[in-house]
Image (cartoon, helix red, strand yellow):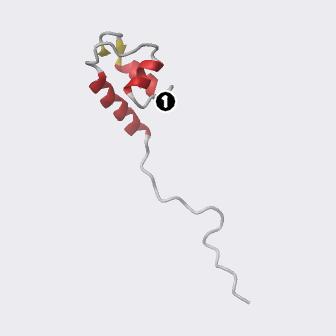
Amino acid sequence: MYVCICNALTHADVAHATTVHGASRPGEVFHACKCRAKCGTCVSVLRELVQQALDATVTPSATPEPAGDAAAPLPAAA
């Protein structure tokens, strides 16, 4: 599906820019695709697509496990 008619950018182009080039804003998508915003009509859709791509790559954070043998008891005080 075309997202930006002026630059012939598709949904796949936006996905590629976010995943391969790390684009996190519409301007970065344009830069990764070697073009620039022209009329600006697509910017709101680009924002949504970039946010969806970022949300898809973020995994829910779990409580990190402590490093080493954290379950071992502390040595007794002398």
Give the residue at x 39% y 15%.
36
Q: Quadrant of the N terminus?
A: top left
Residue at the spot x=29%, y=11% of the render? 5
- Residue extending farthest left: 41
Please tell me which residue lies in front, 47 or 10: 47
- Give the x, y percent position of residue 42: 28, 20
Figure check: 38 above or below 44: above
Relative to 17, 51 lies left or right:
left
Residue 47 percent location from the top left of the image: 32, 29
Where does residue 56 sit, x and y in percent of width and height? 39, 37
Q: Mark 1: which amino acid?
A: Gly
Q: Kindly identify which residue carries mark 1.
A: 22
Residue 68 against residue 43 in the figure, above or below:
below
> At which x and y percent is residue 7?
36, 10
Q: Is residue 47 left or right of residue 30?
A: left
Position of 29 with respect to 49 (left or right) is right
Figure label count? 1
State which quarter of the image contains the C terminus. bottom right
Q: Is residue 30 above or below residue 76?
A: above
Question: Which quadrant of the structure image shows residue 9?
Answer: top left
Residue that sits furthest to the right in the current view = 78
- Disc 1: CA contacts within 10 A as few (<14), some (14-19) or many (>=20): some
The structure residue drawn at horizontal position 28% and vertical position 18%, both measured from the top left corner, is 40
- Badge 1 element: loop
